[in-house]
Amino acid sequence: MESIERSLVEGRAHLLTLPDCCFVVELADYPAARACQVMWAAGTLEAILAAVPRLDAWARGQGCAEMLVEGRGGWARALKDIGYRPWSVTLRKAL
């Protein structure tokens, strides 16, 4: 959370608020394309999923060609017994 707060204060991240949810995103310029990376989301799952088309449209308007979403995945259970601990899973979607 501290790194997200620092990114917001430094202007590297953006807080996007909608009536029933919000997102913290960061725009990243890679050699192949500009991406919108979702760093954090809050709200009910239903509200977040309903907001995805608006988030995609916003990202396209910022010149993004893809979305990246970081989070935890089902791998945590599968690898737990051999010493792995959750860190991050990145999901990608072309816009």
Image: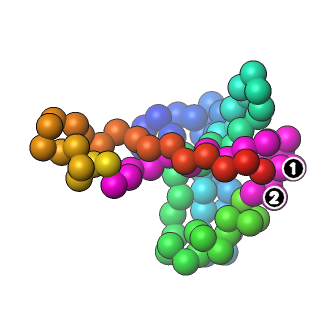
Badge 1, how many Cα within 10 Å: few under 14, some, many 20+? few
Residue at the image point whose x is 75% and y is 57% from the top: 56
Residue 3 counted in the magenta span: no
- Residues in magenta, as a range: 56-74
Badge 2, how many Cα within 10 Å: few under 14, some, many 20+? few
Q: Which residue is mark 1?
A: 61
Name the secondary structure under disc 1.
helix
Look at the picture and state if 45 lies above or below 5: below
Q: Amino acid at mark 1?
A: Gly
The x, y position of residue 92, in whole percent, is 61, 46
Indicate the quadrant where residue 86 lies.
top left
Look at the picture and state if 40 lies above or below 83: below
Tell me if residue 11 can be seen.
Answer: no
The x, y position of residue 38, in whole percent, is 59, 48
The x, y position of residue 28, in whole percent, is 69, 32
Residue 62 counted in the magenta span: yes
User: In this rendering, would 76 be left or right of 51?
Assistant: left
Camera-side residue of 63 and 8: 63
Q: Return the mark for residue 57.
A: 2
Residue at the image point whose x is 55% and y is 47% from the top: 91
Residue at the image point whose x is 79% and y is 42% from the top: 65
Residue found at the very far top of the displayed protein: 31
Circles 1 and 2: CB atoms closer than 8 Å? yes
Residue at the image point whose x is 63% and y is 31% from the top: 10
The x, y position of residue 1, in whole percent, is 42, 43
Camera-side residue of 17 and 58: 58
Q: Amino acid at mark 2?
A: Ala
| Distance between mark 1 and mark 2 Cα atoms | 6 Å
